[in-house]
Image (cartoon, rainbow, N blue to C red):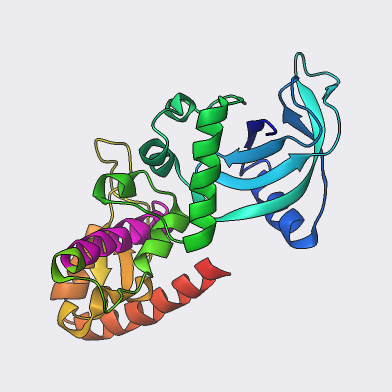
Amino acid sequence: MRLLHIVQGGVENGDKAWLEKAARLNLIARSWIVPKSANVGDEVVIFVCGYGFFATARIESPPKAKKNWTRRYGADLGSLHLIQPAISLGAMRRAVPRLTWANYPRTITTPSPDVAGSIRALIARRRGTRRPDLDDPDLEAANIDELRRVALWKARRSIVPNKRSVYYRVRSLAIRLYVLRRADGRCEACKAPAPFMKSDRSPYLEPHHTTRVADEGPDHPARVIGLCPNCHRRAHYSGDAKAFNASLKQRATRIEKRSQS
């Protein structure tokens, strides 16, 4: 069996956007950083910071030394296919505990054959179900695409009652985390930055259901919005609370539609 290599990609440098385009148009990635030991035909998993395992590919050319980049080698990558949603570090650590690289993913690496087999199986499961297998602790480390997929997951009628309660708890948490991640540190109503940072250095905002829980308010991310404490109190206690909530409902729907595009 061919070796499997984990290589790196970024967001701010344009790698993520380019991979999405390349997978859609069947493009070749020229001179991507790979291990010197890589061979034509080897498999590649591309890790994008902030998202996780984002795409798979195959090495199409022998590695060549990169000019002006000491001890770095580049090779062409073909057969690019996205992993949707991308597999976050939390999901990796849970599914492949022997992948110690996931504890500090700063370099390219070539896992052992048995670990590589577990990675292939994880990717195959994700592509088969297109849904993260996550529980409460994993959600905190999930990427925004995983959170959205769990938030939109519909319960099957065949789920037994005790598992159904777990499903509702996990999904409710996913919606909350997704909306706060979507807000990206700014109130989705007044656009002001979060008033302070929490102890984990994440911005403090509050999720607000624009529809009452009794009316299935938390059932969809488009019905939940991330607010600063001032706007949240306004939505509940101000003289114009009813009108303000109506505007928030419309705003949340627009924001969620944009996040899908």
Nearest to the observer: residue 114 or residue 149: 114
Q: Quadrant of the C terminus?
A: bottom right
Q: Nearer the viewer, residue 121 or 65?
A: 121
Q: Residue at x 49, y 55 (%)?
A: 126
Quadrant showing the N terminus? top right
Taking the magenta stretch, the answer to whether it contains residue 195 is no
Q: Residue 191, percent across and down?
A: 40, 61
Position in image of residue 47 (x %, y %)? 58, 39
Residue 179 inside the magenta-drawn segment:
yes
Name the residue at 46% across, 29% down: 99
From the viewer's perspective, is 163 left or right of 120? left
Q: Within the image, what quadrant is residue 209 found in?
A: bottom left
Residue in view at x 37 percent, y 59 percent = 178
- 150 lies above or below 78: below
217 vs 8, left or right, is: left
In this orientation, does residue 130 appear? no
Quadrant housing residue 113: top right
Residue stretch rendered in magenta on the structure: 165-187
